[in-house]
Image (tube, helix red, strand yellow):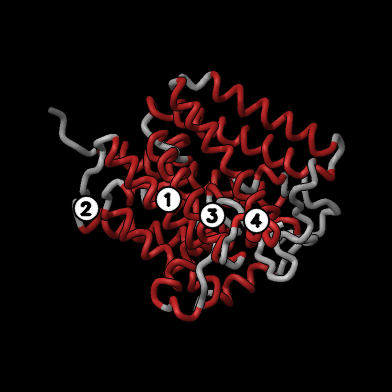
Amino acid sequence: MYEDLAFSLGLDLGPRSASALFGILVGVAFGALAFLTRFCLRRSLVGPAEERAPARGVWALALAVALIGTQAAIALGWIGFDEHRFFAASLPVLLLVAGGLLFGVGAVLARGCITRLTVLTGGGNLRALTGLLVFAVAAHATLQGVLAPLRTTLATPSIDLGAVSLGDLPGGPWVWTAALSAAALVVAIRSGAGRWTLLGAAALGALVPVAWVGTGLVLFDEFDPIPLEGLSFTAPWADTLFFAIASSLREPGFGVGLVGGVLAGSLAAALLSRRFVWEGFESPAQMGRSLSGAALMGVGGVMAGGCTVGAGLSGIPTLSLAAILAFASIVAGILAAGAVEARTVRGARGMLPAE
């Protein structure tokens, strides 16, 4: 399709360069919406009590829209996931669970998942920026560096369930899509989040099928194919790091454009809403905690096959069992680390002298 589109528009760009430009456009929209809605899975699970319900509403509505949009695109024949890594015949359970748990724990330590850190960086948060650099190095080391043997070793134990998605189970894809979307909508309606915030969440969720269709259909070229890609931040940040230090060796694609777009979009939203504030580390302990969390997310995100957005917001709408297992493990890691953190804080307060 892209060859005809490029000819009709007079574009002199290859599919990969066009995908980078497309990534920038999607990223700008995502960054601005995520900043304005305070989109964050960690906050919806273990954040301040008064913020959890509205944050869950934002996440749930975005997921519902992403589910319906992605499955509609599949039903129309625009995209297919038969050869996507989420749909491998064998399920590397140990790798997905271990990676998800590491990522979840890291998100609590770093005070936000990698998506949230990317958005916060646009708002002037230097803690988040430093964490992103550590995350990218750890992710690249796990993909192709010194930690790659750990990933391949954990990937060896796998099981064949005879099904790769919920769509293979009784009821078919639309029954499962309806059930998951209905549950998400109930959470959103009961969340107490504001009308405009929920509207922003719906728009953010719509970017998921937009990304899938854009890379899988609009930019598809039989003579120069590019991979089907959705919203994700683990591999894109590793690619962005490599591109930044060796741009002459690799042409940027959708992922690199997405990262740049999110940074630009969140910066624009922060400036226009007058919420741009420079922030740094307040203590060495805070720095150690934040960077440790970023490193864990880098390793865990690669092992799990995605982050809260890659395996969650983009992965669950495909109904992939691998994505659902990875996301469930991330949630379990966040809840476990949050519980330990809360208990530690209560214990420290209990040791203080009475006033």
Q: Nearer the viewer, mark 1 or mark 2?
A: 1
How far apart are the alpha carbons under marks 2 and 4? 49 Å
Work out whether residue 300 can be spotted: no
When the figure is inspected, residue 215 is found, relative to residue 61, above or below; the finding is below
Work out whether residue 28 can be spotted: yes
Q: Which residue is mark 1?
A: 262
Relative to 178, 292 lies left or right = left
- Looking at marks 4 and 3 on the same chain, the residue that comes earlier in the sequence is marked by 4
- What residue do we see at 48% from left, 40% from top? 41
How far apart are the alpha carbons under marks 4 and 1? 29 Å
- What residue do we see at 75% from left, 56% from top? 87
Q: Amino acid at mark 3?
A: Phe
How far apart are the alpha carbons under marks 1 and 3? 12 Å
**Residue 8, numbered label:** 4
- Name the quadrant containing residue 67: top right
Q: Amino acid at mark 1?
A: Val
Residue 81 x %, y %: 75, 54
The answer to whether marks 1 and 2 mark residues whose Cβ atoms lie closer than 8 Å is no
